[in-house]
Image (cartoon, grey):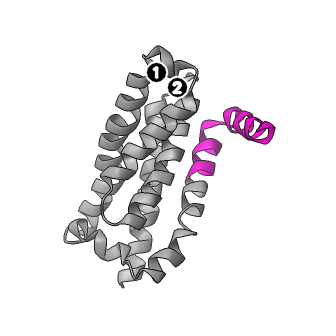
Amino acid sequence: MDKLYELDNYFKKLTMFKFVSVMVFLSVLIVLPLVPLSMIFQVDEVASLNSTMDLSFDWQVFIAAIVAPIIETFLFQTLVILGLRRLKFFRSRMYIVVIISALIFGIVHTYSLIYIMYAFLMGLILAYSYNVYIEKVDSSFIVVALIHSARNILALIAASITIN
C-alpha cells in the first residue's frame, strides 16, 4: 500500500503536461493485455466501432477528439464524481468513487465484452485523474478531457492504420 501512496504522490506533483502525458501513456499500456484476449475470442474491435467509421475522417476526428471527451467527461466523471463526493459516506472513500465512475464508463461502452473491460480500465485512469485535479487549481474537467481526447485520437489513428 505504501508504494501506491508514493505513486499517487508522484503523480500529484507532476505538471499538468507531464501528468496528461503519463496518463495517456498508461491508457495505451492498459490495452495491451486485452489484445491477446480479443484475438483468442476473435473480437474485431475496429469492426465494433463501425458506427463512426462510416463518417469522413474529419468528422471522426471531430467526434473522437472533441465531442466524445467533452460529453463523456461531463457525464461519467464530473456528474458521477461530484455527485458522490457530496455524500458523506464517499468523502473519505475516493477509491470507491473512482471505481463506480469507471464501472459506469465501462458499462456504457458496449461494443463487446473486451471493450467494456478496456473502457473500465480507461475509466479508472480518467476518474483517478479527475480526483487528482479536483484538488488543484487547474481544471479537472480540462485535464480529463485532454487525456480522453489524446487517447481517442491514438485509437483512431491505430484503427485507420489497421483498416488500410
Mark 2 surroundings: few (<14), some (14-19) or many (≥20) residues within 10 A: some
Quarter containing the C terminus:
bottom left
Q: Position of residue 136 (x, y in %)?
A: 58, 23
Taking 50 as reference, is 97 above or below it?
Answer: above
Dot 2: element: helix
Taking 109 as reference, is 33 above or below it?
Answer: below
| Location of mark 2 (residue) | 134
| Location of mark 1 (residue) | 85
Q: Which amino acid, mark 1?
A: Arg
- State which quadrant residue 75 falls in: top left
User: Residue visible at 33% across and 43% down?
Assistant: 72
Q: Is residue 108 magenta?
A: no
Helix, strand or loop for the magenta stretch, by majority: helix
Q: Is residue 9 magenta?
A: yes
Label ID, residue 114:
none
User: Residue visible at 46% across and 63% down?
Assistant: 154
Magenta residue span: 1-23
The mark nearer the N terminus, 2 or 1, is 1
Q: Position of residue 119 (x, y in %)?
A: 43, 55
User: Residue visible at 34% across and 35% down?
Assistant: 74
Q: Are marks 2 and 1 in contact (CB under 8 Å)?
A: yes
Q: Which amino acid, mark 2?
A: Ile
Q: Is residue 91 left or right of residue 8?
A: left
> Observer-nearest residue: 134 or 102?
102
- State which quadrant residue 60 falls in: bottom left
Dot 1: element: helix
Foreground label between 2 and 1? 1
